[in-house]
Image (cartoon, rainbow, N blue to C red):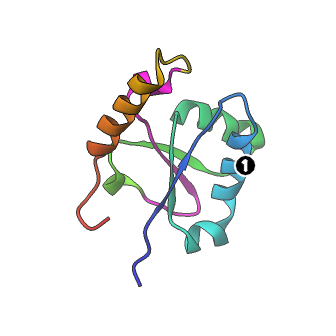
Amino acid sequence: MDIFPIAITMGDAAGIGLEIIAEIFADEDFIAAHPSFVIGDASVLSRTVSTLGLSLEVRKINMLADARMRPDVLDVLEPPDAMLLPDFRTALQTAHQFVGFRANLPCSKGV
């Protein structure tokens, strides 16, 4: 059976999701069983990991093939800058940007 990586979105930078994500990635058993990466802002996640005192390397990746998906690494795929802004003009614009981002998501064949 093929195991596919789990993509976790960072969510609200002011919410509790960052701490939950960092704790999950620090759990060796979870990451070993569920290869995962985060879609979000690597610098924000890096600050969270540092604040929590976790031994995790936060790595910004440019394509899924670059992900290590190991228990000691938190791989972060950053979407285009415009998608990180909280105030999109319309839901339609957001949908178009997401579809364009997803269609161009760099990944290796077979992943």
Which residue occupies the foreground of this view, 59 or 21? 21
Question: What residue do we see at 41% from left, 22% from top?
Answer: 82
With respect to residue 69, does 90 lie above or below? above
Q: Is mark 1 on a helix, strand or loop?
A: helix
Left or right: 2 as drawn, with respect to 39 = left
Q: Which residue is drawn at 51% across and 59% down?
A: 36
In the rendered view, does 110 fall on the left or right side of 83?
A: left
- Residue 28 coordinates in the image, percent (x, y): 65, 67
In the image, residue 38 lies at what x, y percent? Answer: 52, 47
In the picture shown, does residue 80 fall above or below 25?
Answer: above
Q: Could you tell me if residue 85 is visible in this image?
A: yes
Residue 15 on image: x %, y %: 73, 33
The spot of residue 26 in percent (x, y) is 67, 57
User: Is-magenta flag for residue 66?
Assistant: no
Report the residue that reaches farthest toward the bottom: 1
Q: Name the residue under label 1.
A: 20
Residue type for callout 1: Ile
Q: Is residue 43 above or below residue 34?
A: above
- Which of the pair 89/29 is nearer the observer? 89
Which residues make up the magenta segment? 68-85
